[in-house]
């Protein structure tokens, strides 16, 4: 059975989605308050840069998954929206985990 994140494009997408979601929560929950309440704009500068790189990687892998797994346009739009919502990528991952397990069975 294929359980590793790295064994498939979908697995890599799931991993990037989780890391991107974590970076988004850090940006919103830690870096932004540090910027505005502790006058530490560097927190947003560096966290935002990391999150931006992860977001671009998320979109690139989303496009690859769309083509490789022949996802519908609606599913791709929902995956994109999930990246914009706090905790959205975690909800998406629970659904993708089932899809990946079914594909590997």
Image (spheres, rainbow, N blue to C red):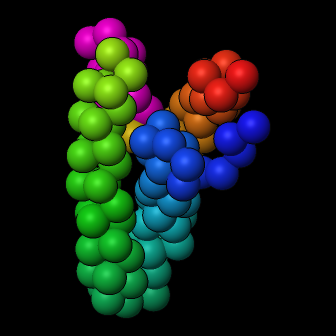
Q: Quadrant of residue 73?
A: top left
Q: Residue at x 25, y 34 (%)?
A: 63
Closest to the observer, 61 or 38: 61
Q: In this orientation, does residue 66 appear?
A: yes
Looking at the figure, which quarter contains the C terminus? Answer: top right
Foreground residue among 72 and 31: 72
Residue 3, image quadrant:
top right
Q: Say whether residue 73 is left or right of residue 85.
A: left
Q: Is residue 90 magenta?
A: no
Residue under the point 51% across and 67% down: 26
Whether residue 64 sits left or right of residue 36 in the image: it is left
- Residue situated in front as seen by the camera: 77 or 41: 77
Q: Main secondary structure of the magenta part?
A: helix
- Relative to 17, 4 lies left or right: right
Which quadrant would the N terminus be assigned to in this image?
top right
Residue 37 place in picture, x, y as percent: 45, 79
Q: Quadrant of residue 39?
A: bottom left
Up-down: is 55 above or below 99?
A: below
**Residue visible at 29% across and 55% down in the picture:** 57
Residue 49 percent coordinates (x, y): 27, 74
Q: Position of residue 4 (x, y in %)?
A: 66, 51
Residue 17: image x %, image y %?
48, 47
Is residue 42 depicted above or below 79 in this figure?
below
What residue is at 47 percent from the left and 64 percent from the top?
Answer: 23
Relative depth, front residue between 32 and 24: 24
Q: Which residues are magenta?
A: 71-82
Q: Is residue 32 above or below residue 93?
A: below
């Amino acid at each position: 059975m294929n359980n590793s994140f790295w064994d498939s494009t979908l697995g890599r997408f799931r991993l990037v989605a989780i890391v991107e979601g974590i970076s988004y929560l850090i940006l919103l929950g830690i870096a932004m308050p540090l910027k505005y309440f502790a006058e530490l704009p560097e927190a947003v500068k560096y966290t935002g840069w990391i999150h931006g790189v992860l977001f671009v990687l998320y979109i690139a892998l989303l496009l690859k998954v769309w083509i490789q797994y022949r996802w519908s346009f609606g599913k791709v739009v929902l995956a994109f929206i999930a990246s914009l919502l706090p905790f959205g990528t975690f909800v998406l991952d629970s659904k993708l985990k089932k899809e990946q397990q079914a594909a590997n069975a």
